[in-house]
Amino acid sequence: MNALLPRPRATLAPGAVHVPDWLPVAEQRALVDACRRWAVGPVPMRHTRLPRGGVMSVQTVCLGWHWRPYAYTRTADDVNGQRVAALPAWLVEWGRRAVADAYEDPSAAADYTPDTALINFYDAAARMGMHQDKDERSSAPVVSLSIGDACVFRFGNTETRTRPYTDVELCSGDLFVFGGPSRFAYHGVPRVRPGTADPATGLSGGRLNITLRVTGLADGRP
């Protein structure tokens, strides 16, 4: 891929939009620096253990609400019992800007207020199987930001983990938003492309994926 050639935005399905090069390098670097701070706690980045005993290959740290399969809580009872770090207001604003830009409609973000972020780090061997983001009690869009190594992102349908699906390359700075009819589509990451990260972002290897979501939950109502 020639980095000098612009990559066009694309709608993969109704409500699912890929916007290449959305996040400038300076903002990517600021987000990398913030992720490094969040990764050390109060709840540290970890490999999430699945209910049947498996362990996810990606490493995860959460903001606002702590996610574990298949629930959100304010405290990380499966890690160290601590309350997760707050979701900063500036990241909420980035989420609103992302929705408005993806849908090319400022009114689309008028009521969009994400209250959690899941930050996943992929090393060269990490993968993410096809899954739905359905632990939330809200159908508000999911905002996904990529930094570091490129990956193959597989975006499917709402009925099955299998075909039809579309593979798209997500590069550092890319935005992907899925909402509306595509909010509960299956999606995953079958592979990362090592060696494609731009050191100017502050991440010389591996991939960070930051997803902003609306849980639809309130304090005291896990």
Image (spheres, rainbow, N blue to C red):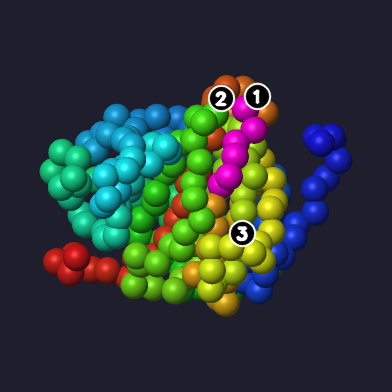
Q: Position of residue 173 (x, y in %)?
A: 63, 42
Q: Position of residue 73 (x, y in %)?
A: 21, 57
Q: Which mark is residue 155?
A: 3
Q: Which amino acid lies under the numbered mark 3 shown in the image of this protein?
A: Phe
Q: Which amino acid lies under the numbered mark 1 shown in the image of this protein?
A: Gly
Helix, strand or loop status at disc 2: loop
154 on left or right of 54 = right
* Residue drawn where x is 54% and y is 52% of the image: 188
Answer few, some or many: residues within 10 Å of disc 2's Cα (few below 14, many 20 plus, some between 14 and 19).
many
- Magenta stretch in the rendered image: 189-194
Asked whether 77 or 192 is in front, the reply is 192
Q: Which amino acid lies under the numbered mark 2 shown in the image of this protein?
A: Gly
The residue labelled by disc 1 is 195
In this view, the mark in front (3 or 2): 3
Earlier sequence position, callout 1 versus callout 3: 3
The residue labelled by disc 2 is 205
